[in-house]
Image (tube, rainbow, N blue to C red):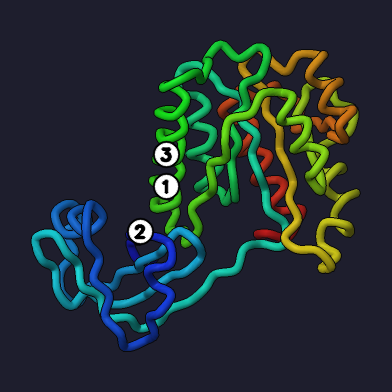
């Protein structure tokens, strides 16, 4: 069984080496001690959310601190091809379910999309709170999955800003039920370019619409910017399911798994 993972701020592990001790503080330490009840002698991982992982043994468990003796400190590289989920805002917390599951499956970044047909709207103070909630969701999911990397939650975009992101991407795929080509085919056709090793990491955008679907006008605008449409399967998936399903298939085809 893998070790439990607790997060510390990015960069805080950079100067450590095997044999050193690290003191975890704050909410993560309290969770480790009072909820997980880690005791002296138990193995544990501390990650900084930016690829560094300390593996060690608990040598002291105080009321608000956890002291760990490092047996190994590693830097986990990012994959050669990064997967970015463009998730349209959806009602009933389905967008949060999508990014949570996608994080457990290995997504590298998520972008909230204010699509035309999205019922949910991020405006004013709500936008900042909603963005913070998404970051909290992916952080918790990364912890559950024992990841050393916490996916980046980028700023919310409208369709115009998304079109610019599509133009800059190595590959942008609109998951659409009317597409002619299967997602596997699109990925396989792009595999050699995406994994040529000359420019890394590459980024693949996986674009998922809201419950009401992506409007024809949005499909045209994103396609004009360079996106391609792809069929995920024979069944129509919900907004909370399509992204994670695409992550699984892409991770397999692109050799991430």
First in residue order: circle 1 vs circle 2:
2
| Above-or-below relation of 225 to 17 | above
Residue placed most toward the observer, 211 or 8: 8
Identify the residue at image location x=76%, y=53%: 253
Question: What residue is shown with label 3?
Answer: 137
Q: Position of residue 205 (x, y in %)?
A: 72, 41
Point 81% across, 62% down: residue? 195
Which residue is at 25% across, 75% downward? 68
Q: Nearer the viewer, residue 174 or 41?
A: 174
Q: Residues within 10 Å of mark 3 (few under 14, many from 20)?
A: some
Question: Which residue is disc 1 drawn over?
Answer: 139
Q: CA distance from mark 3 to mark 1?
A: 5 Å
Q: Badge 2 is on which residue?
A: 7
Quadrant location, the C terminus: bottom right
Crowding near the residue tagged with mark 2, few <14, some 14–19, many ≥20 C-alpha atoms within 10 Å: many
Circles 1 and 2, Cβ within 8 Å, touching? The answer is yes
Residue 248 on image: x %, y %: 65, 46
Tell me the element at label 2.
Answer: strand
Q: Residue at x 45, y 51 (%)?
A: 142
Left or right of 152 in this view: 234: right
Does residue 1 appear in the picture of this structure?
no
- Residue 53 screen position, x and y as percent: 43, 70
Q: Is residue 189 toward the left or the right of residue 35 in the image?
A: right
């Amino acid at each position: 069984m893998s070790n439990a993972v607790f997060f510390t701020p990015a960069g805080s592990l950079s100067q450590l080496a095997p044999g050193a001790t690290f003191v975890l503080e704050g909410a993560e330490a309290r969770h480790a001690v009072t909820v997980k009840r880690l005791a002296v002698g138990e193995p544990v991982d501390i990650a900084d959310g930016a690829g560094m992982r300390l593996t060690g043994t608990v040598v002291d468990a105080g009321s608000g601190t956890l002291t760990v003796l490092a047996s190994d400190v590693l830097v986990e590289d990012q994959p050669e091809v990064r997967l970015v989920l463009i998730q349209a805002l959806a009602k009933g917390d389905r967008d949060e379910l999508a990014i949570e599951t996608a994080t457990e499956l290995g997504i590298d970044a998520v972008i909230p999309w204010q699509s035309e047909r999205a019922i949910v709207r991020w405006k004013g103070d709500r936008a900042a709170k909603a963005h913070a909630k998404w970051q909290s969701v992916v952080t918790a999911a990364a912890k559950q999955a024992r990841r050393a990397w916490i996916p980046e939650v980028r700023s919310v975009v409208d369709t115009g800003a998304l079109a610019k992101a599509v133009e800059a991407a190595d590959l942008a795929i609109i998951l659409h039920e009317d597409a002619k080509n299967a997602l596997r085919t699109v990925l396989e056709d792009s595999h050699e370019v995406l994994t040529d090793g000359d420019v890394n990491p590459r980024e693949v955008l996986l674009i998922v619409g809201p419950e009401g679907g992506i409007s024809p006008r949005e499909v045209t605008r994103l396609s004009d910017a360079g996106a391609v449409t792809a069929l995920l399967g024979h069944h129509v998936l919900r907004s909370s399911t399509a992204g994670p399903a695409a992550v699984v298939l892409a991770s397999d085809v692109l050799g991430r798994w």
